[in-house]
Image (cartoon, rainbow, N blue to C red):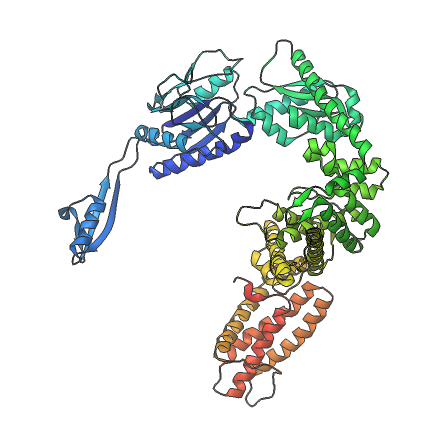
Amino acid sequence: MPQLLLEIFSEEIPARMQPGAARDLERMASDRLKAAGLTWDALTTYAGPRRLTLVVDGLPAATPDRSEEVKGPKVSAPPQALDGFLRKTGLTREQLVERDGVLFAVISSQGRATPDLIPEMVDQIVRTFPWPKSMRWGTGTLRWVRPIKRILCVFDGAVVPFEIDGIAAASSSEAVGGIKSDAITEGHRFLGSGQPLKVSDFVDYRTQLERNFVLLDMADRKLRILEQAKAACAARGLTLVDDDGLLDEVAGLAEWPTPILGDMDPQFLSLPPEVVRLSMKVHQKYFAVRDPARDGLAPNFVVVANVEATDGGKALAAGNSRVLSARLNDARFFWDEDQKVGFDAWNDKLKGVTFHAKLGTLAERVERIAALAREIAPLVGADADKAEQAARLAKADLASGMVGEFTELQGIMGGYYARLAGQPDAVADAVRDHYKPQGPADTVPTAPVTVAVALADKLDTLVGFFAIDEKPTGSKDPYALRRAALGVIRLVLENGVRIDLINFLDASFARLDDQIDAREIARKTAAGGTFLHARGFVGDGKSRHRDLLAFFADRLTVLLRDQGQRHDLVAAVFALGDDDLVRIVRRVEALAAFLATDDGANLLAGYKRATNILRAEEKKGPVPTGMVRTGLPNQPEEEVALAFAVGAARTAVETALDKEDFAAAMSALAGLRAPVDAFFEAVLVNSDVAEERDNRLKLLGQVRDVMGQVADFGQIAG
């Protein structure tokens, strides 16, 4: 079947936009082809420095004929209804079909040739393409990320003719025609033949591009970079430092990437390796290199050029080495100057840096974090003095010259400076790692002092922004509160920290309120006024920590769902009011294992039947509670058996929960499965005898209460 090949050739597309552009092109083309009634075998997109390419295999030559029946008004309907239906369908009254007193319109349409549809599709894609940033050029109305130079469009070996306005003019005052489609592309800007390349299909297109030094597929460009970079390093006994993010970026900068190994001044290796690597990566897009014979970086780098130099890249390497030296000289200046300043001066600067207009300065935030870290320290086995000291130093490097130049090094530089200042390793490590984990793939600290400071930092962030009602909404989370909550959860779970969140949240809210009050007192006093107590921001203490606990529940649900757990089980356990995350997860795991058994599934069904009966009775009035009686006249043995089983289960469940043996608690509940099944099989709950009915409702209430000690089974689907 025919193939569609489309290339939009333009000036350079920023590397960061290329992966998204390939996805958007695939989505937009798929949606429009489907809307036209077309099917295909394969649809693939490619993005590179100067081109977006779409290839669709197995398209039919035309869309199928369509016949659609549309139901209209009744024959007896008013004339206005009939007139409206005729206008909608474009038919006459005689063309309608009557069936069972209702009018129907049969609308038939012939299929259209696929080449007739393609120009409309391309025009819509080009005009509505969702570039993060776009520009208009020449005298046309078209917007694109950079000026479009050509549009190649070939279907079944023939050009699909169309024209789109907006081609760049030779000068801003010169009027030009539109961009006309053709079967021509261009090779590499410098290495190619310089002649237009006429192609017939995708295989020919890709082959000619490679002959003219263009690798169409980003995966091929990345492979070439890795293979040649590693080979260049190996030839000198070195190894490449892997960096997937940088690899993605440089693969979008060159159509024919050519790695070159360069040398740098060894004196720069006295700088922290993170500084060297970041200078290479951020400013120059260089890969760092290691010497396997010793620890640390080698005095080398790998730059990815877009040309194959005749001298093997010696001149390019030398030029890039000079540029890198200038960058690293700047870094060395900051490194040397920062060591002359120190933490006291930096912390003093933080008094003048606003963290948030409603939350005070960074210095005030440091005070809150330090107090909280000291409180958390005993729970994680950390020295309280060291935890507080680390917290007081943790944000100081934000005022340093190095972090001012490289914000990505916050914390990391603080750790270096703390060690140089003679701080204990535990304190320096905590300063370095207290931002961790910063994402789902980031490592979780395990050193006790670091855990204490990291938890304090994240909890203060959450408390502060919840206090001023700056919660995430939809996809918006400007203060990364979801990441902070997930960080707290991972720190707690992976370190087995037993922490009562409610107590710490309440203390943190109170500490923040005290700071706000103190600031307001100072402001009013300076202005000669009187202070009115104004703490509390949004809601009372209970509502604030309740909202924040619900936020933690949501994040924990996401984390456990990614691990294969059901979201409703997390809700069922959180409904008990427990705020110990370690205990909550253990309950969820035990509950999931229990519900996976026949006993668990059947008991859940029995629970729902019992609660439905109780809920219906509660609508009529108060449901009887109290002791269940046995030995009533004509009392079914199944009722007696369930009463004794509930009593035994209650004792076993309470004992197991006291020991936090949740598997044993589930086993105790499993013992209720058979008595509950037998009870519902043999006993009529709503007996005509009031004494029997009340006793049985009490029994069902006890079943619900016993199971409710383990989880809120009412929130479990099934």
Q: Can you name the residue that lies furthest to the front here? A: 528
Closer-to-camera residue (95/264): 264
- Disc tally is 0
Q: Quadrant of residue 655?
A: bottom right
Q: Can you name the residue that lies furthest to the top here? A: 310
Closer-to-camera residue (102/683): 102
Is residue 300 in view? yes
> In the figure, 609 relative to 596: above or below?
below
- Left or right: residue 375 compared with residue 203: right
Residue 682: x and y, percent? 51, 79
Q: Can you name the residue that lies furthest to the bottom here? A: 633
Q: Residue at x 20, y 46 (%)?
A: 87
Closer-to-camera residue (41/290): 290
Residue 23: x and y, percent? 48, 34
Closer-to-camera residue (636/79): 79
Quadrant in which the N terminus is drawn: top left
- Left or right: residue 117 compared with residue 655: left
Residue 497: x and y, percent? 74, 54
Q: Quadrant of residue 219?
A: top right
Q: Residue at x 42, y 35 (%)?
A: 28
Residue 312: x and y, percent? 65, 11
